Image (cartoon, grey):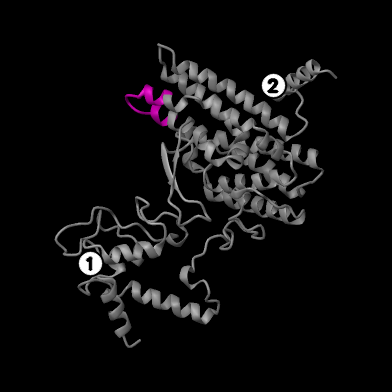
């Protein structure tokens, strides 16, 4: 083969890589085809946004078409490149986050755009079409980044889909059934049905490609969840907890069994914080990268840990942590109100002459948070605790004085 023929063969290969495949033999074909379909719908939406005659209803209808196509491959997009996904369907214009294993690094700024923000913008009484166009700009180009070889190669590997499916099932519990990533409440359940219908196809393609098979119960659960959603059209009356109990919890368990029985290992960073041996979606050891013991990590004996917890509970309610010995943590974070204060918009300041600028955040799940306080200014509870103790508006104490008072206690 001479040099010219090699070039022709290479160009044909590139052309095939970026065209639609009529017969889907595997998950890669399925993924590519749906990327192209979604890209076409995005271009139609972009064209409508640049027309001189802007009609909100036409644009809304086209967004529905785009989101319907998005739901065919949401499982792949979220799992393969979660940061890039924010440019396709980001729920916030700007997000700040820290990585699981980089908790003491500065938070990353993540910029979002895409379908959700466009929906939100159109819902305004006077839509800012300049901003909406910005959220839609380059959406098709960002989508095409998912066709990079590094992503495509991974999709057909035996370990890829079960771990992507695990994230998908977790999102059934959180994102897909709550409206967090869809500004149109009326479309939450239809999109959920599309996602599960496509998930059924994806499981079949995976089994066909790899020769690995899920248990029959798994297939039945997926099928029955689709039928169940067919009888639930009104989101206001949607039995969220019934859906979770009947389908999400057992699907997660069976997917975990599949991962373990085939000894699958993931190299994706997104999986490092999840425990492959945890059978329940509500298990306390599901996120085993979370260390709630902090500086007491070396303590392993239950009786010692119990004493530490009791001591912490005593300190939480003890006013000796404040400068005037009159205010405790529980003064603002009331245990009978889920560790916040629902009796007023914000707690009284230290001198009792005014109010704090913000309401007391509830502390439920606080040990698992990566950014503490409403503005995320602290990276861990130790840092937050030291700040509050010394804040003149809150506890107004000096650390050394607090230590002296604690050490002087007889108990």
Q: Nearer the viewer, residue 336 or 53?
A: 53
Residue 302 versus residue 27 in the image, above or below: below
Residue 339, position in %: x, y?
36, 63
What residue span does the magenta drawing correspond to?
A: 119-133
Q: Which residue is mark 1?
A: 396
Look at the image and say whether residue 121 sits in the magenta stretch: yes
Q: Secondary structure at mark 2?
A: loop
The residue depicted at 29 percent of the width and 67 percent of the height is: 389
Q: Is the C terminus in the top left, top right, bottom left or bottom right quadrant? A: bottom left
Residue 135, position in %: x, y?
44, 28
Residue placed furthest toward the top: 52
The answer to whether residue 161 is left or right of residue 186 is right
The residue depicted at 76 percent of the width and 34 percent of the height is: 26
User: Which label belongs to residue 19?
Assistant: 2
Q: Secondary structure at mark 1?
A: loop
Residue placed furthest toward the front: 3
Residue 236, position in %: x, y?
46, 40
> Is residue 302 something that shows in the picture?
yes
User: Toward which corner of the image does residue 321 lie, by quadrant?
Assistant: bottom left
User: Toward which corner of the image does residue 160 lie, by quadrant?
Assistant: top right
Residue 260 versus residue 27 in the image, above or below: below
Residue 260 versus residue 404 in the image, above or below: above
User: Toward which corner of the image does residue 21 lie, by quadrant?
Assistant: top right
Q: Which secondary structure type mostly characterizes the magenta part of the structure?
A: helix
């Amino acid at each position: 083969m001479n040099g010219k023929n090699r070039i022709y063969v290479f160009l044909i290969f590139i052309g095939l890589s970026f065209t639609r495949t009529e017969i889907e033999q595997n998950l890669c074909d399925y993924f590519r085809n749906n990327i192209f379909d979604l890209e076409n719908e995005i271009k139609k939406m972009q064209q409508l946004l640049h027309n001189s005659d802007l009609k909100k209803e036409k644009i809304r209808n086209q967004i529905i078409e785009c989101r319907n196509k998005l739901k065919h491959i949401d499982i792949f997009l979220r799992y393969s490149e979660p940061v890039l996904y924010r440019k396709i369907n980001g729920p916030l214009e700007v997000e700040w986050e820290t990585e699981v294993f980089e908790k003491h690094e500065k938070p990353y700024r993540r910029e979002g755009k895409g379908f959700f923000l466009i929906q939100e913008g159109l819902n305004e009484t006077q839509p800012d079409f300049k901003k909406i166009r910005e959220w839609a700009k380059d959406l098709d180009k960002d989508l095409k980044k998912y066709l990079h070889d590094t992503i495509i190669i991974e999709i057909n590997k035996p370990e890829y889909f079960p771990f992507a499916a695990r994230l998908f099932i977790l999102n059934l519990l959180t994102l897909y059934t709550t409206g967090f990533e869809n500004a149109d409440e009326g479309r939450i359940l239809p999109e959920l049905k599309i996602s599960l219908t496509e998930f059924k196809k994806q499981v079949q393609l995976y089994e066909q490609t790899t020769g690995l098979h899920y248990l029959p119960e798994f297939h039945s659960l997926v099928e029955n969840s689709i039928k169940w959603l067919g009888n639930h059209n009104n989101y206001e009356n949607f039995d969220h907890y019934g859906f979770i109990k009947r389908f999400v919890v057992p699907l997660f368990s069976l997917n975990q069994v599949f991962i373990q029985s085939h000894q699958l290992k993931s190299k994706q960073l997104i999986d490092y914080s999840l425990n492959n041996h945890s059978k329940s979606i509500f298990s306390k050891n599901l996120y085993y990268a979370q260390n709630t013991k902090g500086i007491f990590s070396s303590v392993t004996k239950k009786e010692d840990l119990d004493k530490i917890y009791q001591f912490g509970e005593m300190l939480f309610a003890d006013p000796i942590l404040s400068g005037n010995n009159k205010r405790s943590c529980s003064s603002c974070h009331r245990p009978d109100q889920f560790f916040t204060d629902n009796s007023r918009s914000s707690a009284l300041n230290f001198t009792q002459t005014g109010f704090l600028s913000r309401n007391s955040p509830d502390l439920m799940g606080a040990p698992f948070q990566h950014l503490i306080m409403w503005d995320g200014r602290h990276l861990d509870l130790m840092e937050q605790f030291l700040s509050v103790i010394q804040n003149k508006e809150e506890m107004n104490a000096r650390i050394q004085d607090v230590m002296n008072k604690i050490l002087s206690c007889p108990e």
